[in-house]
């Protein structure tokens, strides 16, 4: 019994550090950073049209949380699903992939 009680805090710490289930990750370009702690990320997908077999561009815009206001318009970023942060924000920016060249 003493060994189980000693391992209980370690088991709790292990479950607390364990990541959540599968969360989608998308890559897109920042289109707007005018809001505080929020960026609008546009994700463009190319999918074949079922009838004509041509590739069609489909774009979708997501509002993502940017805690430090560090991402700028034009940056390629990776966003990940998250619990609802506000009425429309359900994504967070996880990392910067590339930044456009500035002259």
Image (cartoon, grey):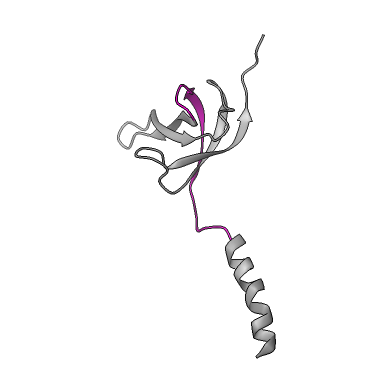
What residue is drawn where x is 54% and y is 35%? 67
What residue is drawn where x is 65% and y is 16%? 101
Q: Write the start and end of the magenta stretch as one range.
A: 18-36
Q: Give percent across and percent down for residue 39.
A: 48, 29
Q: How many marks?
A: 0
In which quadrant is the C terminus drawn?
A: top right
What residue is drawn where x is 32% and y is 37%? 50
- Which residue is nearer to you in this view: 82 or 99? 82
Q: Give percent across and percent down for residue 20.
A: 52, 58
Residue farthest along the bottom direction in this orientation: 1
Q: Is residue 65 magenta?
A: no
Using the image, determine if residue 49 lies above or below residue 102: below
- Which residue is nearer to you in this view: 75 or 64? 64
Within the image, what quadrant is residue 51 found in?
top left
Q: Give percent across and percent down for residue 85.
A: 42, 43
What residue is drawn where x is 32% and y is 31%? 52
Q: Is residue 46 visible?
A: no
Using the image, determine if residue 40 lies above or below residue 83: above
Residue farthest along the left direction in this orientation: 51
Q: Is residue 71 visible?
A: yes
- Which residue is nearer to you in this view: 53 or 26? 26
Q: Give percent across and percent down for residue 99.
A: 62, 23
Within the image, what quadrant is residue 89 found in?
top left
Q: Is residue 34 magenta?
A: yes
In which quadrant is the N terminus drawn?
A: bottom right
């Amino acid at each position: 019994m003493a060994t189980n009680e000693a391992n209980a805090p370690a088991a709790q710490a292990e479950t607390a550090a364990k990541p959540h289930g599968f969360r989608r990750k998308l890559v897109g370009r920042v289109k707007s950073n005018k809001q505080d702690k929020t960026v609008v990320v546009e994700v463009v997908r190319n999918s074949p049209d079922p009838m004509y077999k041509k590739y069609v561009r489909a774009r979708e815009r997501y509002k993502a949380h940017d805690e430090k206001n560090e991402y700028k318009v034009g940056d390629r970023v990776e966003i990940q699903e998250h619990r609802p942060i506000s009425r429309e924000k359900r994504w967070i920016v996880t990392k910067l992939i590339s930044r456009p060249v500035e002259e």
